[in-house]
């Protein structure tokens, strides 16, 4: 029965990848249609909240911003998008929800086949992590319109799932003794949620850099840039997403130390995985501190956010695979 459930789980994941790819196409059409008609620049004043953004970024000095049609529920259609762009975004959202249902079913079946939580090795971690990225994207989209991020989120998800199914797949195996703990559920799940929020903040920061680039862009990219939310809105959204991710990552660090104390009799041992988890925490703590107290809003904050997520990807894709230690649970 276990091999059958495992095979069915994999089939559902392949189906989810195909649906996500279709959603990626729909969101890409949405962006293309938004870029097809020039947007009308409108100068707006954005209230600055504590620790968020201000107009201290020299790249933004004296630069008008455009309305942020994707940043608030009930906002008007994109100036350069028209009805076609809105329809493509709605199709992309529906396909994303459908793909996530297949994806979630695949994750659940993998857990049923293994008779445990489905995040005990690299393959399962990838399945559950990408499902949480999509779930976070959908949940945030209910509060803040994120259609402009759809192509990036779906493209990243398809890439990660493709790598996972091709390079990380392993059959269902029992848990090793060190992982047979309730802390596996808490520690890893919270780490996955933190990664999902960091991933969204990373994509928002990349979008911010596009909106602040004023020279050397083709005309279509210029029109697309002008139809995106204003830089201040993007900077503030990246900051808020990072705060949530940082709180979750802090809990991950603390829970991991408690688990290590119970499993190995010490809370900290400078294992390579522990070191990189701490490095990631320091990078994001530096981002939040610099943004809140040093006025590092704008481009510098965006680059710090990007560097932080690069460290997350390195921790997942390199440390887990190529480094040995007490946390060598990749299953490869």
Image (cartoon, rainbow, N blue to C red):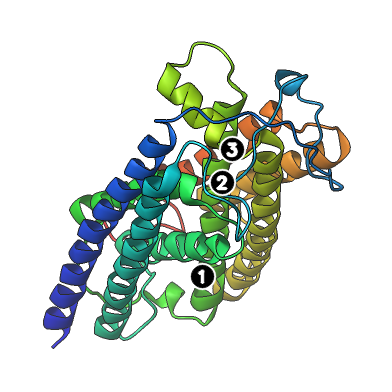
Residue at 34 percent of width and 74 percent of height: 104
User: Is residue 85 or residue 276 the one in the foreground?
Assistant: 85
Is 305 situated left or right of 173 in this image?
A: right
Labels 2 and 1: the sequence-earlier one: 1
Per the image, label 1 sits on a secondary structure element best described as: helix
Label drawn at residue 189: 1
Residue 128 is situated, as x and y percent measured from the top left of the image, at 39, 67
Identify the residue at the far top of this view: 216
The answer for how far apart the CA atoms under marks 3 and 2 are is 22 Å
Q: What mark, if any, has residue 205 been given in the picture?
A: 3
Specify whether 131 is left or right of 275.
left
Secondary element at tag 2:
helix
Closer to the camera: disc 3 or disc 2? Answer: 3
Q: Relative to residue 224, is residue 46 drawn left or right?
A: right
Label 3: element kind: helix
Other residues around mark 1 within 10 Å, as few (<14) / some (14–19) / many (≥20): many
Label 3 to label 1: alpha-carbon separation: 25 Å
Instruction: Give the camera-side residue of 203 and 314.
Output: 203
* Residue 322, x across and y down, in percent: 36, 43
Residue 246 in the image: state x and y as whole percent: 67, 55
Q: Please report the residue visible at 47 percent of the width from the left and 50 percent of the height from the top.
A: 147
Mark 2 or mark 1, which is nearer to you? 1
From the viewer's perspective, is residue 6 above or below residue 256? below
- The C terminus lies in which quarter of the figure? bottom left
Judge whether residue 156 can be spotted in this image. Answer: no
Write the residue at 49% across / 81% down: 181
Quarter of the picture holding the N terminus: bottom left
Q: Earlier in the sequence, mark 3 or mark 2?
A: 3
| Disc sitting over residue 276 in the figure | 2
């Amino acid at each position: 029965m276990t091999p059958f459930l495992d095979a069915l789980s994999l089939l559902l994941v392949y189906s989810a990848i195909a649906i996500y790819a279709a959603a990626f196409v729909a969101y890409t059409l949405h962006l293309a249609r938004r870029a097809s008609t020039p947007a009308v620049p409108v100068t707006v004043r954005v209230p600055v909240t504590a620790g968020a953004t201000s107009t201290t970024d020299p790249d933004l000095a004296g630069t008008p911003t455009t309305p942020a049609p994707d940043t608030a529920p009930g906002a008007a259609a994109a100036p350069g998008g028209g009805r076609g762009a809105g329809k493509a975004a709605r199709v992309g959202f529906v396909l994303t929800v459908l793909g996530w249902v297949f994806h979630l079913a695949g994750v659940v079946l993998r857990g049923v086949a293994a008779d445990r939580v489905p995040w005990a090795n690299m393959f399962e971690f990838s399945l559950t992590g990408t499902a949480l990225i999509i779930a976070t994207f959908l949940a945030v989209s209910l509060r803040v319109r994120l259609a402009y991020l759809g192509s990036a989120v779906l493209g990243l998800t398809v890439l990660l799932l493709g790598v996972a199914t091709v390079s990380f797949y392993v059959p269902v195996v029992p848990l090793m003794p060190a992982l047979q703990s309730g802390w596996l559920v808490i520690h890893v799940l919270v780490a996955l949620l933190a990664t999902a929020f960091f991933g969204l903040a990373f994509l928002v920061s990349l979008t911010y850099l596009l909106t602040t680039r004023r020279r050397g862009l083709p005309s279509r990219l210029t029109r697309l840039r002008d139809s995106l939310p204003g830089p201040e809105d993007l900077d503030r959204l990246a900051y808020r997403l990072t705060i949530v991710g940082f709180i979750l990552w802090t809990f991950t660090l603390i829970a991991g130390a408690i688990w290590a104390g119970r499993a190995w009799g010490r809370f900290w041992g400078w294992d390579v995985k522990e070191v990189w988890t701490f490095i990631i925490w320091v990078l994001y703590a530096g981002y939040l501190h610099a943004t809140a107290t040093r006025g590092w809003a704008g481009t510098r904050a965006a680059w710090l956010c990007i560097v932080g997520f690069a460290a997350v990807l390195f921790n997942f894709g390199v440390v887990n695979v190529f480094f040995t230690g007490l946390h060598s649970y990749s299953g490869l």
